[in-house]
Amino acid sequence: MPTSNGRVALVTGASGQLGRVLVAALRDAGFRALGSDLVVGEGADIALDVTDESSVAAGFGAAERSAGPVDVLVNCAGFAVFDPFDQRKAADFDKVLDVNLKGTFYCIREMARRFRPSGSPTTWGSIVNVASFFGVVSPDPRVYVDTARHSSEVYGAAKAGVIQMTRYFAVHLAPKRIRVNAVSPGGVINRALQGEGFIAAYGDRVPMRRLAEPPEIAAAVRFLASTEASYVNGHNLVVDGGLTAW
């Protein structure tokens, strides 16, 4: 398992299904991992609203007071809408962009402002953005057989923006000794929200014949966050069981 040597990691969106698993995986690897979300509790140690610049600054400050300067940032906060595109409300469109794209930017910028490199030349800061395979390909409408939770055009556009932002900051933060990468999960199992028809139809689209388990996504994030990925920069690691391979 990749290790961290006690480095401080801040995970946004820590109260969500994936965020909680990410915090636990980083702690298991020896990171001093702190979770953040809109309110403290349910996996979040720090209150941080990624859409509010002052809240982002305050959240980083709270993390520093609690554990020390942040070495690793995992941008996991996200928001999605599921109604048909021809019913899209402007406010919902804006919120998806605000949380997924603008929020990622605010957190990256705050990390860049605060980070001071230390240790060996290969020990850099690390930012891992949680994007989505929907930033690479379109959702397949044929799999939504028993659910109204269709992924949206604006969510995919926002996640495509996150992937491009990852490349941008991989270049522009290298002088500050910060690596920037992304993980793009495919579908993740959540039986509370997914019907059996969807689960089966989605599995038919994947060479590995199933959705991902949350720890499988967390393992990819943990690797990119760790010093084992010391020469990985500007990469989008797609974790989708091979769905985008055909």
Image (cartoon, helix red, strand yellow):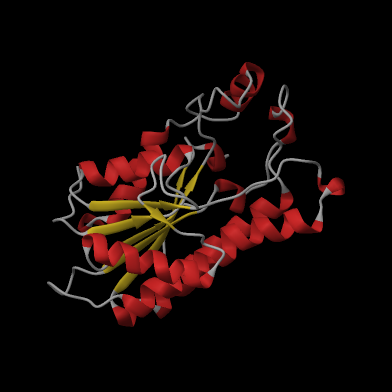
Using the rendered image of the protein, determine whether residue 136 is visible from the camera's viewpoint. no
In the displayed image of the protein, which residue is found farthest to the bottom?
Answer: 175
Side (left or right) of 213 relative to 206: left
Locate residue 10 relative to residue 92 in the image: left or right: left
**Residue 238 vs residue 15, the one in the foreground:** 15
Q: Of all residues shown, which one is farthest toward the top?
A: 196
Q: Residue at x 20, y 59 (%)?
A: 7
Where does residue 32 sit, x and y in percent of width and height?
A: 22, 53
Split into 4 quadrants, where in the image is the C terminus?
A: top right
- Look at the image and tell me whether residue 26 can be seen: yes
Q: Which residue is painted at 40% across and 61% down in the image?
A: 181
When asked about the image quadrant of residue 178, the answer is: bottom left
Residue at position x 25%, y 60% in the image? 66
**In which quadrant of the rendered image does the N terminus lie?**
top left
* 120 shown above or below 185: below
Please tell me whether residue 176 is drawn above or below residue 57 in the rendered image.
below
**Of residues 185 and 70, the one drawn nearer to the viewer in this rendering:** 70
Q: Position of residue 156 (x, y in %)?
A: 65, 52
Query: Percent from the top left, x then y, of residue 205?
Result: 60, 29
**Along the line of sight, the residue nearer the viewer: 136 or 127:** 127
The x and y percentages for residue 128 are 39, 58
Camera-nearest residue between 89 and 153: 89
